[in-house]
Amino acid sequence: MTDRLNGPTDPRDTTSRGSTPGPDPTPQTPAESPDPANTRAKTGRSRLGPSAIVAWFFVLPAMVLLGIWVIYPIIYSIFRSLYDATGTQFVGLQNYGTIFTDSGTLTTIRNNLIWVVVAPIIVTTLGLIFAVLTERIKWSTAFKLIVFMPMAVSLMAAGVIFRLVYEEAPDRGVANALMSTVSGVFSSGGGLEGARPRENDTSPVAQEGGAVVTKQPVQAGQPVLIPLVGLKPEAVPADAKPAAAATGQGLTGTIWLDFTPGGGGKAGEVDGTEKGLPGVTVEAVSGGSVAATATTGPDGTFRFEGLAPGSYTVRLPQSNFEAPFNGLTWLGPTLITPAIIGAFVWVWAGFAMVLIAAGLAGIPRDALEAARIDGATEWQVFRKITVPLLSPVLLVVFVTMIINTLKVFDLVFIIAPGSVQPNANVIALEMWRVSFGGGNNQGLGSALAIFLLVLVLPFMVMNIRRFRREQ
């Protein structure tokens, strides 16, 4: 083709005048941006930050220490558990069989089972209650500080504290002092523990059940004599005066300790050297009901006021002969395990409260308010909304407490006296006692250590998996 003005033209030229430009047969591709994955592949780096060599350089010291302090002891304990106490004779799985056949180790397993069932439930429940309630009070920060403060105390120090708290004497043990105060409000012993009438036909009174009653009905103007024996001289009240014969109008009488130190006197008669029993409650009974009540004075005499004429039976109720409350034996074989669990709860309740409170702060408030607007009560909101939303945190706290209870050692070792320590024994303490506490059987001790590791591992794996899922 020839252009008249410009001469021959190239048939491939599509930009000449008078022609409409057509589509470009070769599509233009935009400039490609560099792919970060390809760039990392070319440079040899799999992620941002330093290279793997630098990371291993910093991790290696921790790995070495981990191997020395954790991996090697585990492997050596497995190896050592297959040998006898001296470590010279191979016994196979005999030590593991001893764990499930010896009565002492079976007691430790039973105690650990009680710990695993009771302690985590109490700690988690208290932590949940504290976390929810502290949202409603103004001084929540101070309350949380007080509850969390035991976490700053080591378990050994906590054991020393509770060893004093559980002292049986109310003047030294805080727990029994509080219980004695509460018990004294409702009832108190009459101070005549061990006292009783003489067991002969000449005694004017007899013992019926726990009370002391006159054998024959009495009337006004006839003084009632109630001699008692069996009371230790040191148990006689300090304000007691020499016994005296009762005088005056109405129904009167005398209650005294019918015993003369060094001998002498006549049984059933008031002697000047014998002590009256003050503060004794006396009842006048007619027709099976109490008509009047009186209390003896320092010389043991009593008199009923405003009593109608007639015949009565004089009775000393059983409360006079009951021993005063002197506290529970917290450190005895029966209560030693619950007492130690109480100390454990005191230490760890603050930890549970803080974790649960953090989870509670993340709950969307609109869900709670929507439930309240729909007419739900606070209990329904707590049970059907708060607890389900907190279930991941509650599970973490619960599993963590299970691991801690399986490893408990300090509290049991410090709180339990030596005489009852076998009753409160747990696996961790038994492992130490067998190996280093006088048993000198490191074969059985190593078997107990591996057995404890096997019990703890599933709960540790459970926690690790949950942490990974949350991440």
Image: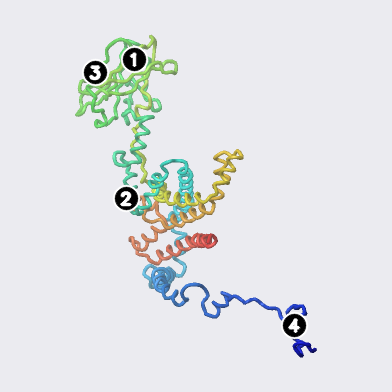
Residue 57 vs residue 349, the one in the foreground: 57
Whole-Å distance between the Cαs marked 3 and 4? 149 Å
Instruction: Give whichever of discs 4 and 2 has the lower sequence position.
Output: 4
Front of the two marks 2 and 3: 2
Q: Residue furthest front?
A: 5
Decide: few, some or many residues near mark 3? Use Cα within 10 Å; few <14, some 14-19, many ≥20.
many
Q: Quadrant of residue 335?
A: top left
Residue 276 to residue 429: above or below: above
Judging by the rendered image, the residue that carries numbered circle 1 is 304
Across and down, in percent, residue 432 comes to 37, 61
Residue 382 to residue 73: above or below: above
Across and down, in percent, residue 77 comes to 42, 68
Q: Residue at x 34, y 51 (%)?
A: 159
Judging by the rendered image, the residue that carries numbered circle 4 is 16
Instruction: Give whichever of discs 3 and 4 has the lower sequence position.
Output: 4
- Callout 3: SS: loop
Judging by the rendered image, the residue that carries numbered circle 2 is 160
What amino acid is found at the position of numbered circle 1 in the picture? Phe
Front of the two marks 4 and 2: 4
Q: Residue furthest right?
A: 1
Q: Is residue 128 left or right of residue 68?
A: right
Front of the two marks 3 and 1: 1
Whole-Å distance between the Cαs marked 2 and 3? 53 Å
- Callout 1: SS: loop
Judging by the rendered image, the residue that carries numbered circle 3 is 244
Can residue 80 be spotted in the picture? no
Instruction: Give whichever of discs 1 and 2 has the lower sequence position.
Output: 2
What amino acid is found at the position of numbered circle 4 in the picture? Ser
What's the image's color scheme?
A: rainbow
Across and down, in percent, residue 336 comes to 39, 47
